[in-house]
Image: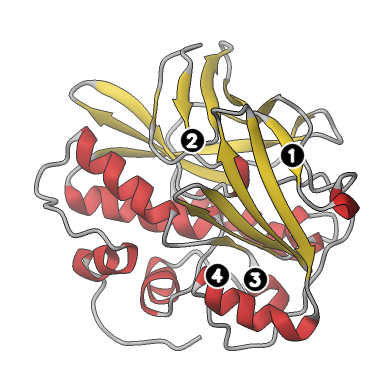
Protein backbone atom coordinates (compact mmCIF):
# COMPACT_ATOMS: atom_id res chain seq x y z
CA UNK A 1 0.00 0.00 0.00
CA UNK A 2 1.53 3.27 -1.06
CA UNK A 3 1.52 6.01 1.52
CA UNK A 4 1.37 9.63 0.40
CA UNK A 5 2.22 12.55 2.59
CA UNK A 6 -0.26 15.40 2.77
CA UNK A 7 -3.02 16.74 4.90
CA UNK A 8 -6.31 14.92 5.16
CA UNK A 9 -8.91 17.05 3.43
CA UNK A 10 -12.52 16.78 2.37
CA UNK A 11 -11.82 17.54 -1.29
CA UNK A 12 -9.65 14.42 -1.61
CA UNK A 13 -12.38 12.36 0.05
CA UNK A 14 -15.12 13.76 -2.19
CA UNK A 15 -12.99 13.06 -5.27
CA UNK A 16 -12.53 9.46 -4.05
CA UNK A 17 -16.29 8.91 -3.75
CA UNK A 18 -17.17 10.87 -6.90
CA UNK A 19 -19.18 13.54 -5.09
CA UNK A 20 -19.20 16.93 -6.83
CA UNK A 21 -22.04 18.78 -5.09
CA UNK A 22 -21.92 21.59 -2.54
CA UNK A 23 -21.10 20.57 0.99
CA UNK A 24 -21.46 23.77 2.98
CA UNK A 25 -24.91 22.82 4.33
CA UNK A 26 -24.95 19.89 6.80
CA UNK A 27 -28.49 18.88 5.83
CA UNK A 28 -30.24 15.56 5.26
CA UNK A 29 -30.12 15.72 1.46
CA UNK A 30 -26.33 16.12 1.46
CA UNK A 31 -25.90 13.35 4.04
CA UNK A 32 -27.96 10.97 1.90
CA UNK A 33 -25.85 11.80 -1.16
CA UNK A 34 -22.44 11.29 0.42
CA UNK A 35 -23.64 8.14 2.22
CA UNK A 36 -24.74 6.62 -1.10
CA UNK A 37 -21.61 7.74 -2.92
CA UNK A 38 -19.40 6.22 -0.22
CA UNK A 39 -20.95 2.74 -0.30
CA UNK A 40 -20.75 2.68 -4.10
CA UNK A 41 -17.12 3.82 -4.24
CA UNK A 42 -15.25 2.41 -1.24
CA UNK A 43 -15.52 -1.36 -0.74
CA UNK A 44 -16.25 -3.14 2.49
CA UNK A 45 -13.19 -5.41 2.70
CA UNK A 46 -10.92 -7.16 5.18
CA UNK A 47 -8.21 -8.12 2.68
CA UNK A 48 -5.39 -6.61 4.74
CA UNK A 49 -5.74 -9.47 7.22
CA UNK A 50 -5.11 -11.95 4.41
CA UNK A 51 -2.25 -9.95 2.89
CA UNK A 52 -0.12 -9.98 6.03
CA UNK A 53 -1.01 -6.37 6.85
CA UNK A 54 -2.21 -5.00 10.17
CA UNK A 55 -5.36 -2.91 10.40
CA UNK A 56 -4.88 0.03 12.73
CA UNK A 57 -7.41 2.56 14.00
CA UNK A 58 -5.35 5.60 13.12
CA UNK A 59 -7.33 8.15 11.13
CA UNK A 60 -4.40 9.34 9.02
CA UNK A 61 -3.42 5.76 8.14
CA UNK A 62 -7.05 4.99 7.24
CA UNK A 63 -7.31 8.15 5.11
CA UNK A 64 -4.17 7.20 3.19
CA UNK A 65 -5.41 3.66 2.67
CA UNK A 66 -9.04 4.30 1.70
CA UNK A 67 -8.75 7.68 0.01
CA UNK A 68 -5.24 7.96 -1.41
CA UNK A 69 -4.46 4.29 -2.08
CA UNK A 70 -7.84 3.27 -3.52
CA UNK A 71 -8.46 0.54 -1.00
CA UNK A 72 -11.52 -0.39 1.02
CA UNK A 73 -11.80 -1.34 4.65
CA UNK A 74 -14.03 -2.86 7.28
CA UNK A 75 -16.36 -0.85 9.51
CA UNK A 76 -13.67 0.23 11.96
CA UNK A 77 -11.97 1.96 9.03
CA UNK A 78 -14.84 3.05 6.75
CA UNK A 79 -17.12 4.36 9.48
CA UNK A 80 -14.25 5.90 11.45
CA UNK A 81 -13.34 7.84 8.30
CA UNK A 82 -16.99 8.72 7.62
CA UNK A 83 -17.41 10.07 11.14
CA UNK A 84 -14.43 12.39 10.58
CA UNK A 85 -16.01 13.54 7.30
CA UNK A 86 -19.34 14.28 8.98
CA UNK A 87 -17.71 16.27 11.77
CA UNK A 88 -15.58 18.24 9.30
CA UNK A 89 -18.77 19.08 7.40
CA UNK A 90 -20.43 20.34 10.57
CA UNK A 91 -22.84 17.51 11.32
CA UNK A 92 -23.86 16.77 14.92
CA UNK A 93 -22.38 13.27 15.02
CA UNK A 94 -22.02 10.70 17.81
CA UNK A 95 -20.12 7.43 17.41
CA UNK A 96 -21.93 4.32 18.65
CA UNK A 97 -20.96 0.65 18.90
CA UNK A 98 -23.03 -2.35 17.93
CA UNK A 99 -23.00 -6.14 18.18
CA UNK A 100 -23.58 -8.15 15.00
CA UNK A 101 -26.17 -10.95 14.87
CA UNK A 102 -24.63 -14.43 14.62
CA UNK A 103 -27.01 -16.95 13.02
CA UNK A 104 -25.11 -19.92 14.46
CA UNK A 105 -25.45 -18.57 18.00
CA UNK A 106 -28.93 -17.27 17.11
CA UNK A 107 -27.98 -14.21 19.12
CA UNK A 108 -25.95 -11.06 18.89
CA UNK A 109 -22.21 -11.59 19.18
CA UNK A 110 -20.47 -10.79 22.47
CA UNK A 111 -18.16 -8.11 21.06
CA UNK A 112 -18.93 -4.47 20.34
CA UNK A 113 -17.38 -5.07 16.95
CA UNK A 114 -19.29 -2.73 14.64
CA UNK A 115 -18.92 1.06 14.60
CA UNK A 116 -21.86 3.25 13.48
CA UNK A 117 -22.95 6.88 13.87
CA UNK A 118 -25.94 8.77 15.17
CA UNK A 119 -26.46 12.05 13.32
CA UNK A 120 -28.86 14.75 14.50
CA UNK A 121 -30.36 16.93 11.75
CA UNK A 122 -33.03 19.54 12.52
CA UNK A 123 -33.57 17.85 15.86
CA UNK A 124 -34.19 14.40 14.33
CA UNK A 125 -31.81 11.45 14.91
CA UNK A 126 -30.55 9.19 12.10
CA UNK A 127 -28.27 6.16 11.99
CA UNK A 128 -25.49 6.34 9.38
CA UNK A 129 -23.52 3.21 8.49
CA UNK A 130 -21.40 3.03 5.33
CA UNK A 131 -19.67 -0.26 6.07
CA UNK A 132 -21.65 -3.42 6.62
CA UNK A 133 -21.51 -4.65 3.05
CA UNK A 134 -23.43 -7.16 0.89
CA UNK A 135 -27.25 -7.22 1.17
CA UNK A 136 -27.31 -5.77 4.70
CA UNK A 137 -25.81 -2.46 3.57
CA UNK A 138 -28.04 0.61 3.86
CA UNK A 139 -27.54 3.07 1.03
CA UNK A 140 -28.93 6.01 3.00
CA UNK A 141 -29.18 6.81 6.72
CA UNK A 142 -32.13 5.38 8.65
CA UNK A 143 -34.43 7.48 10.82
CA UNK A 144 -34.05 6.49 14.45
CA UNK A 145 -37.76 5.72 14.88
CA UNK A 146 -38.86 2.43 16.43
CA UNK A 147 -40.71 0.01 14.17
CA UNK A 148 -40.94 2.25 11.10
CA UNK A 149 -40.60 0.44 7.75
CA UNK A 150 -37.83 2.17 5.79
CA UNK A 151 -37.67 0.75 2.24
CA UNK A 152 -34.33 0.86 0.45
CA UNK A 153 -32.88 -1.00 -2.53
CA UNK A 154 -31.87 -4.06 -0.50
CA UNK A 155 -35.28 -4.42 1.18
CA UNK A 156 -37.21 -2.92 4.06
CA UNK A 157 -35.09 -1.92 7.05
CA UNK A 158 -36.41 -1.33 10.57
CA UNK A 159 -34.92 0.00 13.78
CA UNK A 160 -36.66 -1.44 16.84
CA UNK A 161 -36.38 -0.05 20.37
CA UNK A 162 -36.30 -2.96 22.81
CA UNK A 163 -35.73 -0.83 25.87
CA UNK A 164 -32.12 -1.71 26.71
CA UNK A 165 -31.04 -2.01 23.07
CA UNK A 166 -32.03 -0.97 19.57
CA UNK A 167 -32.10 -3.65 16.86
CA UNK A 168 -31.67 -3.22 13.12
CA UNK A 169 -33.48 -5.79 11.00
CA UNK A 170 -34.24 -6.19 7.31
CA UNK A 171 -36.96 -7.92 5.34
CA UNK A 172 -35.57 -8.84 1.94
CA UNK A 173 -36.52 -10.94 -1.03
CA UNK A 174 -36.10 -14.54 -2.11
CA UNK A 175 -32.73 -15.44 -3.63
CA UNK A 176 -32.79 -16.63 -7.23
CA UNK A 177 -29.46 -18.34 -7.88
CA UNK A 178 -28.55 -18.44 -11.56
CA UNK A 179 -25.89 -21.13 -11.19
CA UNK A 180 -27.24 -24.59 -10.22
CA UNK A 181 -24.03 -25.58 -8.44
CA UNK A 182 -24.54 -22.74 -5.93
CA UNK A 183 -28.20 -23.28 -5.04
CA UNK A 184 -27.20 -24.89 -1.76
CA UNK A 185 -24.23 -22.64 -1.06
CA UNK A 186 -23.84 -21.54 2.56
CA UNK A 187 -23.27 -18.02 1.23
CA UNK A 188 -26.89 -17.74 0.09
CA UNK A 189 -29.17 -16.09 2.65
CA UNK A 190 -32.52 -17.83 2.87
CA UNK A 191 -34.08 -15.84 5.71
CA UNK A 192 -36.61 -13.33 4.48
CA UNK A 193 -36.40 -11.26 7.68
CA UNK A 194 -33.15 -11.17 9.58
CA UNK A 195 -31.63 -9.24 12.44
CA UNK A 196 -28.43 -7.46 11.48
CA UNK A 197 -27.09 -5.88 14.66
CA UNK A 198 -28.07 -4.30 17.96
CA UNK A 199 -26.76 -1.13 19.56
CA UNK A 200 -27.22 1.31 22.42
CA UNK A 201 -27.12 5.10 22.28
CA UNK A 202 -24.12 5.33 24.62
CA UNK A 203 -21.46 7.53 22.98
CA UNK A 204 -18.20 5.82 22.10
CA UNK A 205 -14.66 6.95 21.38
CA UNK A 206 -12.21 5.33 18.92
CA UNK A 207 -10.21 3.96 21.86
CA UNK A 208 -13.24 1.89 22.87
CA UNK A 209 -12.67 -0.22 19.74
CA UNK A 210 -8.89 -0.74 19.94
CA UNK A 211 -9.00 -4.06 21.79
CA UNK A 212 -11.69 -5.56 19.54
CA UNK A 213 -9.94 -4.22 16.44
CA UNK A 214 -6.97 -6.38 17.44
CA UNK A 215 -9.06 -9.39 18.40
CA UNK A 216 -11.15 -9.43 15.22
CA UNK A 217 -8.05 -9.71 13.02
CA UNK A 218 -6.16 -12.24 15.17
CA UNK A 219 -8.72 -14.54 16.85
CA UNK A 220 -8.94 -17.91 15.01
CA UNK A 221 -12.70 -17.90 15.74
CA UNK A 222 -13.29 -14.46 14.18
CA UNK A 223 -15.34 -14.23 11.00
CA UNK A 224 -12.66 -12.01 9.54
CA UNK A 225 -9.81 -14.49 9.97
CA UNK A 226 -12.02 -17.22 8.47
CA UNK A 227 -13.14 -15.38 5.35
CA UNK A 228 -11.51 -12.94 2.97
CA UNK A 229 -14.26 -10.49 2.00
CA UNK A 230 -14.61 -7.69 -0.52
CA UNK A 231 -17.98 -6.21 -1.46
CA UNK A 232 -19.16 -3.06 -3.19
CA UNK A 233 -22.64 -1.68 -3.77
CA UNK A 234 -23.72 -1.03 -7.37
CA UNK A 235 -26.58 0.89 -8.97
CA UNK A 236 -28.61 -2.34 -9.16
CA UNK A 237 -27.38 -4.37 -6.18
CA UNK A 238 -23.86 -5.33 -5.17
CA UNK A 239 -20.87 -7.48 -6.06
CA UNK A 240 -18.72 -9.53 -3.72
CA UNK A 241 -15.62 -11.69 -3.66
CA UNK A 242 -15.75 -14.08 -0.71
CA UNK A 243 -12.74 -16.38 -0.68
CA UNK A 244 -12.70 -17.69 -4.26
CA UNK A 245 -16.42 -17.07 -4.95
CA UNK A 246 -17.29 -14.02 -7.03
CA UNK A 247 -20.94 -12.95 -6.99
CA UNK A 248 -22.95 -10.28 -8.75
CA UNK A 249 -26.32 -9.66 -7.10
CA UNK A 250 -29.13 -7.77 -8.84
CA UNK A 251 -32.10 -6.53 -6.86
CA UNK A 252 -35.41 -7.09 -8.65
CA UNK A 253 -38.08 -5.76 -6.26
CA UNK A 254 -40.73 -5.78 -8.97
CA UNK A 255 -40.29 -9.57 -9.21
CA UNK A 256 -39.77 -10.10 -5.48
CA UNK A 257 -36.32 -11.68 -5.95
CA UNK A 258 -32.61 -10.98 -5.74
CA UNK A 259 -30.78 -12.58 -8.66
CA UNK A 260 -27.44 -14.11 -7.64
CA UNK A 261 -24.88 -14.85 -10.35
CA UNK A 262 -22.09 -16.78 -8.62
CA UNK A 263 -18.90 -18.46 -9.79
CA UNK A 264 -15.65 -19.72 -8.35
CA UNK A 265 -12.47 -18.11 -9.64
CA UNK A 266 -8.91 -19.37 -9.82
CA UNK A 267 -6.10 -17.84 -7.76
CA UNK A 268 -4.62 -16.20 -10.84
CA UNK A 269 -7.91 -14.39 -11.59
CA UNK A 270 -8.33 -12.79 -8.19
CA UNK A 271 -6.03 -9.81 -8.71
CA UNK A 272 -7.75 -8.94 -11.98
CA UNK A 273 -11.23 -9.20 -10.44
CA UNK A 274 -10.21 -6.95 -7.54
CA UNK A 275 -8.84 -4.37 -9.98
CA UNK A 276 -11.64 -4.47 -12.54
CA UNK A 277 -14.67 -4.98 -10.30
CA UNK A 278 -13.67 -3.21 -7.09
CA UNK A 279 -10.90 -0.83 -8.22
CA UNK A 280 -8.71 -2.39 -5.51
CA UNK A 281 -4.99 -2.73 -6.11
CA UNK A 282 -3.18 -4.80 -3.50
CA UNK A 283 0.47 -4.25 -2.71
CA UNK A 284 0.93 -7.59 -0.98
CA UNK A 285 -0.20 -11.00 -2.16
CA UNK A 286 -3.64 -12.06 -1.03
CA UNK A 287 -4.19 -15.52 0.41
CA UNK A 288 -7.95 -16.09 -0.05
CA UNK A 289 -9.78 -17.85 2.78
CA UNK A 290 -13.30 -19.21 2.96
CA UNK A 291 -13.71 -21.45 5.98
CA UNK A 292 -17.18 -22.44 7.12
CA UNK A 293 -18.86 -19.59 9.00
CA UNK A 294 -22.19 -17.84 9.48
CA UNK A 295 -21.59 -15.25 6.78
CA UNK A 296 -24.09 -14.85 3.93
CA UNK A 297 -24.40 -12.50 0.99
Q: Is residue 17 visible?
A: yes
State left or right for residue 6 relative to residue 291: left
Circle 4 residues within 10 Å: few <14, some 14–19, many ≥20: some
Q: Going from the N terminus, do you reach mark 2 or mark 3 first?
A: 3
Mark 4 falls on what kind of element? helix
Question: Circle 4 is placed at which residue position?
Answer: 277
Residue 66 drawn above or below residue 203: below
Q: Going from the N terminus, do you reach mark 4 or mark 3 first?
A: 3
Question: Circle 3 is placed at which residue position?
Answer: 47
Q: What whole-number distance in Å separates the C-alpha atoms at marks 3 and 1?
A: 28 Å
Circle 1 residues within 10 Å: few <14, some 14–19, many ≥20: some
Question: Circle 1 is placed at which residue position?
Answer: 176
Residue 110 drawn above or below residue 121: below
Mark 1 touches mark 2? (CB < 8 Å): no
Q: What whole-number distance in Å separates the C-alpha atoms at marks 4 and 3?
A: 15 Å
Q: Residue at x 67, y 43 (%)?
A: 259
Mark 2 touches mark 3? (CB < 8 Å): no
* x and y, in percent, of residue 277 in the image: 55, 70
Q: Going from the N terminus, do you reach mark 1 or mark 2 first?
A: 2
Q: What whole-number distance in Å separates the C-alpha atoms at marks 4 and 1?
A: 22 Å
Question: Circle 2 is placed at which residue position?
Answer: 153
Mark 3 touches mark 1? (CB < 8 Å): no
State left or right for residue 169 relative to residue 24: right
* x and y, in percent, of residue 106 in the image: 82, 28
Q: Residue at x 46, y 13 (%)?
A: 148
Q: Going from the N terminus, do you reach mark 4 or mark 1 first?
A: 1
Residue 81 drawn above or below residue 177: below
Q: What whole-number distance in Å separates the C-alpha atoms at marks 4 and 2?
A: 20 Å
Q: Residue at x 9, y 49 (%)?
A: 24
Mark 1 falls on what kind of element? strand
Label 2 vs label 3, nearer the camera: 2
* x and y, in percent, of residue 17 in the image: 33, 62
Amino acid sequence: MSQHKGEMNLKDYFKRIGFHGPYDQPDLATLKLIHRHHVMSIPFENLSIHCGERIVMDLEVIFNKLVRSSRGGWCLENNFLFGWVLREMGYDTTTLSSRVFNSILNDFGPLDSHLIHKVIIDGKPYIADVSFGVSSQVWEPLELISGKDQPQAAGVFRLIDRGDIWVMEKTGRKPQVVNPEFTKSSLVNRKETKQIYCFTLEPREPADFFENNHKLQTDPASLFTNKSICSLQTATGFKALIGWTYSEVTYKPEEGVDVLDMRDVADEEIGQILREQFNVELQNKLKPVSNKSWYTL
